[in-house]
Image (cartoon, rainbow, N blue to C red):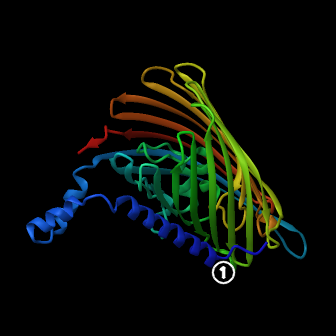
Amino acid sequence: MSAFSSRSFWTLLMLSLLCICGLAQSENQAESNPLADQQQSSGGDPDLNQILHSALQNFQRRLFYSATVSEGYISTRATSTSADSNAIRITSSWLREAFTVFRPYIALNLHRGRTGLTLQSAPVITYIPSRVGRFDINGFLDPRMDFSFALSPRLELDVSGTLRYGDGWSQAFVLRPQSSASSVSSSTSAESATQALSSAQFAVSGQVGLKWQRSRRQELSLMVGKGYSTVPGQATSNNASDVNIVRGQVVEHVTPLISLVGYSQIHQINSGTYKCTLTGGGLGLSQYARTTSWSLEAGPEYGSPGCNNRIQVSVSGGFQHALSNRTAVDFYTGRTINTFYVPGNYWVTSIGTGLHHRTSDSTSLDLTGSYLHGSNSWDALNDYSGFFLTPRFQWRVTENSTVITEYGHLASTRRSGSTLDHDWITLGLSWHPNPKIF
């Protein structure tokens, strides 16, 4: 199998966009344009304010915003192993310090029918007294964008993008929950933990997708995506990761509650001298009910000669169940390519669970935990395993304010013998007013 080159990837992306433009033109060429009619009747060109007002007046606009301020204390233990000509040396460090975390959140949602645009950001700003006067990156940026547009009654376009930038210390606090606009899903606990354990300082990803409702029971979709991330301090030839993905799938709604999925996909991985192309496919099944929902998909992937392992298996599954009106549990597992771990460790296995209990009308308790394992790196010593545990208690003091206290434990071990452990406890106040509709 020949390698899936970057030129082929971008050619496929351009062809997809050209098809989108052609379909949109064929769907809309018979429709009238009120703005153009108004322009012809008035004999003049509308200015920019008129164009923007005409475009936005029919959209429902919602503004979400909130903020969380926390005071905490963290204990960090790190060990590293290195070999010299005489023996193996082990060095360790132990750091304890107080910190302050401020996390604002803002999201703008524009929605009309099947067309929607959401822009959101929830940066993490940390103040650490021991770092005052140093030029460290004390924070974490996480802006996101999601756009959907109905090209026709049966054809829909989806575009999304994410940028992440920050130091590994601040990424630990991405585990903190945040408000979210309904059209954009928040990161799972496993995704947040992979960010916290990663050494990547910059990552950007985006995807373009088409979904066609072939019939009431069948949907076809095509997605083209790209992810890029870098790590400071690594060798120049291995300090960046570039991953491309193309995925097509068919969803058959067997019943209103049960769906069957068939998919095929291609991954292209470029990291310095490491080049790997994986091609595969699989099947999936999902069921959604009032109290219990679950989904599972899996399939093999076959690698090109440049891959470390020629045969891999991808798995993704989740389970949610409401034990009562006040208690719910969830479970998830997956083995897939994750671009945020650099260098290497492209295959990430995660297993996690959560317990959510509303202790009263104003208080709740959450307990989440996960195990992660990264493998198939270009350097076997970079393979790692890690886990995290975060019990969290929330007390809703008023309609728009909540007190949150949390203990967190995050640990990782690499095959080279180095370890990293974080233990922290925080007490914070979250302000979350109702969204503004204008």
Which quarter of the rendered picture does the N terminus lie within?
A: bottom right
Which quarter of the rendered picture does the C terminus lie within?
A: top left
The residue lying at 20 percent from left, 62 percent from top is: 35
- Residue 175 lies, in percent from the top left, at 55, 46
User: Vertical placement of 334 versus 322: above or below?
Assistant: below
- Residue 26 lies, in percent from the top left, at 40, 62
Q: Is residue 260 left or right of residue 381?
A: left
The residue lying at 37 percent from left, 28 percent from top is: 397
Residue that lies at the very extreme toward the left in this rendered image: 42
- Residue 135 lies, in percent from the top left, at 48, 70
Q: Is residue 57 left or right of residue 201?
A: left
Residue that lies at the very extreme toward the right in this rendered image: 86
* Picture quadrant where residue 399 is located: top left
Between residues 98 and 103, which one lies in front from this camera angle?
Answer: 103
Between residues 41 and 177, which one lies in front from this camera angle?
Answer: 41
Pointer 1: residues within 10 angstroms few (<14), some, or many (20+)?
A: few
Q: Secondary structure at mark 1?
A: helix
Q: Pointer 1: what residue?
A: 236
Residue type marked 1: Thr
Residue that lies at the very extreme toward the bottom in this rendered image: 236
Q: Is residue 58 visible?
A: yes
- Residue 411 lies, in percent from the top left, at 69, 49
Between residues 284 and 237, which one lies in front from this camera angle?
Answer: 284
